[in-house]
Image (cartoon, rainbow, N blue to C red):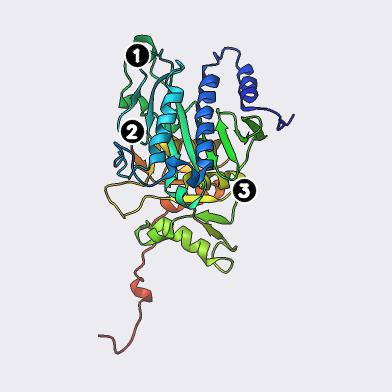
Amino acid sequence: MPLTGRWTLTRYLIEQRRRYPGASGELNALLLDVSLACKALARIVSRGALGSALGNALPAGGSINVQGEVQKPLDVLSNEIFVRMNEWSGHLGGMASEEMETPSQIPATYPRGKYLLVFDPLDGSSNIDVNVAVGSIFSILRAPADVLESGRDVVEADFLQPGAAQVAAGYAIYGPAAQFVLTVGDGVAVFTLDPDLGEFVLTQSNVQIPADTQEFAINSSNARFWEPPIKRYVDECLAGKPGPRGKDFNMRWIASMVAEAHRILMRGGVFLYPRDSKDPSRPGRLRLLYEANPVGFLMEQAGGRASTGRQPMLGVQPHELHQRIGLVFGSRNEVERIERYHREPVASETPAPLFAPRSLFRD
């Protein structure tokens, strides 16, 4: 029986829990705390330039974050909101954020729980000034048993779990409507914030990404740095109907990960932010734990695929808290094609001698 739009996020989580009689309810409570942080940010973001937190000047103590990016006031505020709204409940052993160099410890005054929360508190914040949709991305992992048993502080190694180990993941998107997109490992559901109720209400369940698409998203300004398989794929798309793909493609690029992921979940497509040679010290630009893994989990749960281009994203073993990686996700058949191009031998751009230009007058 299809779910109706009258289900709140709370009811949805209760119904999910009823399927597992042994469940404690702690995950539900944690997800509701996360959603509350997202509600608070939705309200702040919706005020735009009217909100004092959206200015460009850094507050006292503001600086360059661990990612080497300038923190805007709302970056700092959103991180603080996530930490404060989730540290007190007793469901977490610790947290890690894109905005913090080291894990955030649960204060000694609060009990510690069996989960870890990993988050990007405000993805796409550089788009705030031009009123483009931004969002928050989160991932929930199980904490090592001794975090709860001994009450020890969490360390970086506790968070270095592959994406396949995620218990839940999702994002909130702050656009014309604020929406909360969630998977607990049983498909993907979309909730829309009802401003009259002050609740996220279920508006889509069992989201499925079409296996085929005619739309791709990539930052083409980096074309000169792409690896041959990516160049091949994009060139074939741009060749359109007369080309080897036999159909025309549209290209999109929003520069907001949440907005790109949401568009693909809603109507299909493929997103590419691959490894390139622009900065050889970085094997990619996106963050494995805060962006690639949670988005990858959502895509796989919606029937899509997420990959580095060389291997499934959810199988990557992290080795650093702020590790970067190349990411391709979206419609399954397109992602699998890109993976196949990475496996195939690279065609030489130098013509073979047999077909080289010939002339009696060659030097």
Q: Is residue 80 left or right of residue 253?
A: left
Camera sees residue 302? no
**Relative to 110, residue 301 above or below:** below
Camera sees residue 99? yes
The label shown at residue 100 is 2
> What is the CA distance from the residue labelled 3 to the residue labelled 1?
46 Å
Earlier residue among tags 3 and 1: 1
Disc 1 residue crowd, few under 14, some 14–19, many 20+, Cα 10 Å: few
Disc 3 residue crowd, few under 14, some 14–19, many 20+, Cα 10 Å: some
Residue lying at 45% horizontally and 53% vertically, measured from the top left? 341
Label pair 1/2, CB-CB below 8 angstroms: no
Residue lying at 35% horizontally and 17% vertically, measured from the top left? 107
SS at badge 1 = loop
Relative depth, front residue between 56 and 226: 56
Q: Which residue is mark 1?
A: 108
Q: Which residue is mark 3?
A: 267
**Relative to 7, residue 252 above or below:** below
Q: Position of residue 115 (x, y in %)?
A: 44, 20
Which quadrant of the rendered structure holds the N terminus?
Answer: top right
The label shown at residue 135 is none
**Relative to 154, residue 333 above or below:** below
